[in-house]
């Protein structure tokens, strides 16, 4: 099997699974319990929180465990909007955000907030000057995806942070689900107030994630109850998941120090696909993360390519996994100026550090054969 759908989810690392099983078996007490067994669980949870904070260069109290990227984005955006609505009702985001951001923005608009949606250029990157022009005295939040989940474009996070560094009442949220472990980011050294990532994107377990929240930022909680996670996310903590997440993050950040093989595979795929007739590559290497490739085959729908490759035991996706079953043209690609036909036919190859160049070569061979056969049928 060749698995090239890692932006949808990754295979849990064996060492991470071993950690999860060990903790779940031996530290199953509720961390909120008063007895000694519960206290040991609480100590382990706090240790994991501290490990994650240290790896990210932030404070322990700035780490909130969540169930993943979607929950983290909801808590960050709605939590901040409702907490600071007395200061302003204006939010800035982009046209190419994940549904867990885009749909939250739509909900906030229905509740009296005003949202500015920044356009992107043909490379999938926002214009900083347009961001600056959109700022008002009422702007309380900017929410921009760090790495796009469909084409891999990297946004100028450093420059965005610098733009609002002196604006006391404007906060900056980054959906970094696709960037963590792939694109280096000094969170503690940047003007980022909120940042989200999800464990299952870097070989941890589904149902685990983190929201970084700078200590001076206040959020209205999404889940009320027992007051866990400093009152921001009530519910009995997923101790084993949190410990396993810390282990997976350490491994991912170690891999991040050497992305040369990942980049080699991506560049090979980009070059070979671009060379094939009637192919359009939507990922621009100069502004893209090292693990995402998006392209269209002229005259063929994306799901047709996905299922044809599936028969060869090769797995890719039609752009975002969250919206792939709707069979709609990619909103990201349309925002980049791609035609409806090409956007509907787009597919995404997404890599992990476990993939090898030999797999990429097999993929290109099978893709060429599939396109040739499909073209014969069309003719």
Image (cartoon, grey):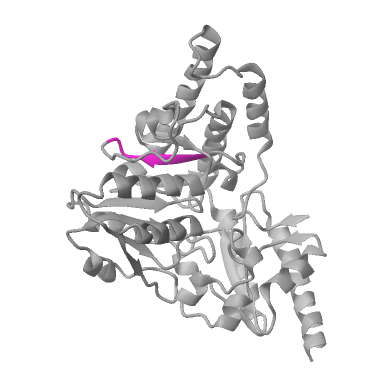
Residue extending furthest toward the top? 36
Q: Residue at image x 48%, y 18%?
A: 32
Q: Check the image and report above or below for 46 versus 338.
A: above
**x then y, percent, for residue 357:** 68, 59
Number of marks in the rendered image: 0
Q: Check the image and report above or below for 129 versus 78.
A: below
Q: Would residue 42 be visible to someone looking at this image? A: yes
Q: Check the image and report above or below for 191 versus 111.
A: above
Q: Is residue 84 magenta?
A: no
Q: Is residue 225 left or right of residue 136?
A: right
Q: Is residue 200 left or right of residue 161?
A: right
Q: Which residues are magenta?
A: 209-215
**x then y, percent, for residue 373:** 81, 81
Q: Residue at image x 55%, y 19%?
A: 30
Q: Is residue 21 left or right of residue 87?
A: right
Looking at the image, which is closer to me, 11 or 325? 325
Q: Check the image and report above or below for 374 versus 253.
A: below
**x then y, percent, for residue 167:** 18, 52
Q: Would residue 192 be visible to someone looking at this image? A: no
Image quarter of the N terminus? bottom right
Image quadrant assignment for residue 221: top left
Image quarter of the C terminus? bottom right
Q: Is residue 211 magenta?
A: yes
Q: Which secondary structure class fits the magenta region best?
A: strand
Image quadrant assignment for residue 53: top left
Q: Is residue 75 left or right of residue 83?
A: right
Q: Residue at image x 53%, y 14%?
A: 38
**x then y, percent, for residue 227:** 41, 27
């Amino acid at each position: 099997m060749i698995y090239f759908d890692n932006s949808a989810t990754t295979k849990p690392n064996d060492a991470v699974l071993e950690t999860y099983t060990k903790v779940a078996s031996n530290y199953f007490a509720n961390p909120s319990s008063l007895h000694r067994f519960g206290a040991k669980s609480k100590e382990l949870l706090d240790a994991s929180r501290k490990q994650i904070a240290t790896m990210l260069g932030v404070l322990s109290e700035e780490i909130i465990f969540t169930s993943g990227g979607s929950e983290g984005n909801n808590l960050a955006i709605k939590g901040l909007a409702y907490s600071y609505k007395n200061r302003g009702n204006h939010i800035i985001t982009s046209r190419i955000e994940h549904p867990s951001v885009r749909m939250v923005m739509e909900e906030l608009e229905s509740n009296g907030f005003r949202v500015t949606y920044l356009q992107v250029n043909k490379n999938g990157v926002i214009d900083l000057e347009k961001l600056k022009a959109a700022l008002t005295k009422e702007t309380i939040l900017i929410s921009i995806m760090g790495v796009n989940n469909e084409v891999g474009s990297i946004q100028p996070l450093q420059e965005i942070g610098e733009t609002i560094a002196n604006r006391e009442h404007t906060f900056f949220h980054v959906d970094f689900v696709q960037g963590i472990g792939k694109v280096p980011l000094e969170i503690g050294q940047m003007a980022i107030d909120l940042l989200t990532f999800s464990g299952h994107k870097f070989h941890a377990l589904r149902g685990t994630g983190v929201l970084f929240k700078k200590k001076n930022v206040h959020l209205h909680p999404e889940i009320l109850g027992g007051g866990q996670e400093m009152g921001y996310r009530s519910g009995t903590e997923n101790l084993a998941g949190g410990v396993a997440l810390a282990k997976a993050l350490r491994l991912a950040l170690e891999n991040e120090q050497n992305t040369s093989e990942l980049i080699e595979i991506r560049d090979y795929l980009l070059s070979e696909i671009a060379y094939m007739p009637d192919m359009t590559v939507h990922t621009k290497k100069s502004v893209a993360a090292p693990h995402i490739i998006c392209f269209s085959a002229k005259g063929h729908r994306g799901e047709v390519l996905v299922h044809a490759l599936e028969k060869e035991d090769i797995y890719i996706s039609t752009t975002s996994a969250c919206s792939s079953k709707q069979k709609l043209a990619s909103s990201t690609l349309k925002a980049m100026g791609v035609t409806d036909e090409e956007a509907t036919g787009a597919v995404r190859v997404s890599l992990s550090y476990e993939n090898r160049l030999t797999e990429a070569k097999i993929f290109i061979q099978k893709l060429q054969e599939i396109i040739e056969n499909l073209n014969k049928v069309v003719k």
